[in-house]
Image: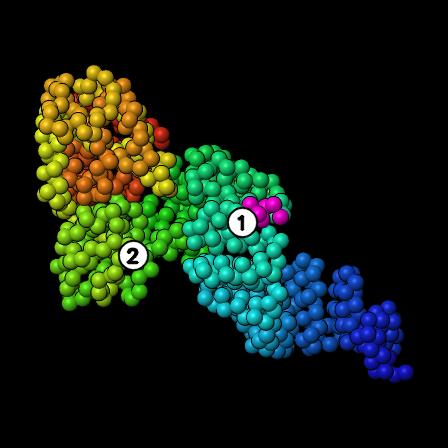
Amino acid sequence: MTTDQLYQQAMQCHQSGKLAEAQALYRQVLALEPNHGDAWHMLAGLAHQSGDNAAALASVRRAIDANPSVAIYHASHGLILSAMEQPDDAIDAYRQALRLDSNLAGAHTNLGNLLKDKAQWSEAIAEYRAALTLRPDHPPTLHNLGLALKHEDKLLEAIDAFRRAVQLAPELIDSRLQLSESLREAKRVDEAIAEACRALAQKPDSAPAHTSLGLALQESNRLDEAIVEYRQAIALDPKYTAPYTNLGVALETRRESAQAIALLRKAAELEPDAAPVHQNLANSLLSLGEFDEARKELDTALALKGEFPEALTTLGKLQTELGQLDEGIASYERAVALRPKFAEPTWNWSINLLLRGDFEHGLPKFEARRKVKAFRADRGLSGQMWDGRAIEGKRILLHWEQGLGDTIHFVRYAKILKERAAGVSLLCQPTLKRLLTGQCGLETVVGDSEPLPAYDFYCPLPSLPLLLKTTLQTIPADVPYLFPEPPLVEKWKELLAQEPRRKVGLVWAGNPQHQNDRNRSIRLEDLAPLTSASGAPTGGSRDPDAFSDGGSPPVRAPAALARFYSLQKGPAAEQAKSPPAGMEVVDWTERLTDWAETAALITCLDLVITVDTAVAHLAGAMGKPVWVLLPFIPDWRWMLEREDSPWYPTMRLFRQPTRGDWRTPIQRIAADLQKL
């Protein structure tokens, strides 16, 4: 037979699965024609199929030597080099193949995969798109395109790619789970849950599907249901790391840090080389104040994955907690350089700048908070967010974004906007509605779930300092800017009319769900040094109705001494029933049904002593003397070192000199209280 006849016979054997016969015939061809490029190429394919990549590499290189202008030889060269874990050489081979023939869809896909593995996302996306132009209905390419787009924060395009992959190949559960995850990240939570449920319908015993459903449920604030899914995933596959990590993060959300750490340690045992596991463990350790252990885990994470923005962000938080603000900023800056669209490090960076009073650079970066997953930054509002443009003749709707204290703090800006806009309205937390109605020039105040007033623009309250160009020197601090209802004040005045002592309100704890509550809250018993000013011979909580029957309270001490009134709400309010020995605490908090009532009572007090809570903002906004106990690294508004607040002229700040030292500022407060 001629060489061509032998080659055709070899090809027929190859195609029919007679591989040994095909190999023998290819070698006969080469015996007759040693530079037969196609025969060398097919021998390379047989060797690669059998797992002998060294022989495959030698054969494909003989094919290229025989005819270097054949694109498919270079593509096969890339495939074999990739299998031999030589990605850089494989990339070069694929690029050479595509220079010779740009219509090789498989070469574009495989090159994209190599670039994806090297985190060269934009280049990978370009290769996948080129492949899909040639072969539009290829599910694996669509799947990998979705992964690359997701890493580039192009969620809508990623969702489209995963959805197309699932439509073409419904059995691809991995693509469906990636679709669910992408929908969750895009805040399309109901769709994410539906896709995860479809994956479970396909494969009920899939631990990844239960985990994906758990993540979507958690995003929907259905934490208990999410935890059930994570536990089910662990039961199905005890060696699968993801549910341990996600269950740990879920328990950390519930402030169950000890259990979270145990689960994350288990995940680290199962997958010691998984950098994200160590990073999540570091986060939980940091929340418990275990700084040395957290640093060890971060060092491990960064050793495993040097370019790891999440770990650098956690490192920045740890450094900031230790008072190392410069080092924290450097870590955040590195994280942002690695992933410019990663919002959390930019937001944290802004906090460090604002702590120093650097509003010029801090406030623009502070806007990154609106892209952090934990926030519903726009409260689901439709329309256009105000960007600082002229608003004469326009109506603007301000809306709450974070805590109660933030709403009270930033509502002062409504007065400034009232001078510019046709009308200013506010969407606030329902418990603040009565207090804020009619204040600061607000035309309308509505609570969540109530019909909204008409508006041309909306704006989150915390964005106003930036949009109104606030500097440290131009903070609008004209207090009071909140005024309680006179009838409420009169009611409280009657209750307190016969109290001769100095009347001091106390708050010792904030919302236990606040992410920094461990650092900012104390117990009532920690305020025991204040008893030196109380004049009460024994401890005990005042009967709430003691003054409501027309009788006079017993006068046990000179008028210069103080009596304390609990303003504490929430779980910590129970502590008022058993105050420190020698401290008498009047507890009327059952009557504080909303913040309008609290404001009216504060009006009748001489002083408020509080940790960093909404009460601090309320007393400051009312122009009342208020003394605030601050942790070593406080909220950004209180900045560093200073004892006054440019936001609230009637406020004094008492700071921890070192982390965890509440004794020093409390002793200072006790001494200053006696001086009153």
Image quadrant containing the N terminus? bottom right
Tell which of 496 and 310 is nearer to you. Answer: 496
Q: Residue at x 23, y 55 (%)?
A: 446
Q: Residue at x 14, y 44 (%)?
A: 484
Residue 595 location, quadrant = top left
The answer to whether marks 1 and 2 mark residues whose Cβ atoms lie closer than 8 Å is no
Work out whether 224 lies above or below 149: above
Q: Which residue is mark 1?
A: 229
- Look at label 2 and name its amino acid: Ser
Residue interval drawn in magenta: 230-236
Looking at the image, the residue that sits furthest to the front is 549
Q: Position of residue 355 (x, y in %)?
A: 29, 43
Work out whether 326 lies above or below 136: above
Q: Position of residue 284 (x, y in %)?
A: 47, 40
Image quadrant containing the C terminus? top left
Q: SS at mark 2?
A: loop
Q: Residue at x 58, y 40 (%)?
A: 266
Q: CA distance from mark 1 to mark 2?
A: 30 Å
Q: Which residue is mark 2?
A: 449
Work out whether 495 lies above or below 425: above
Please give left or right for residue 529 compared with residue 151 in the image: left
Tell which of 489 and 617 is nearer to you. Answer: 489
Please give left or right for residue 478 compared with residue 98 in the image: left
The answer, for residue 60, to whether it is visible in the render is yes
Q: Residue at x 42, y 59 (%)?
A: 187
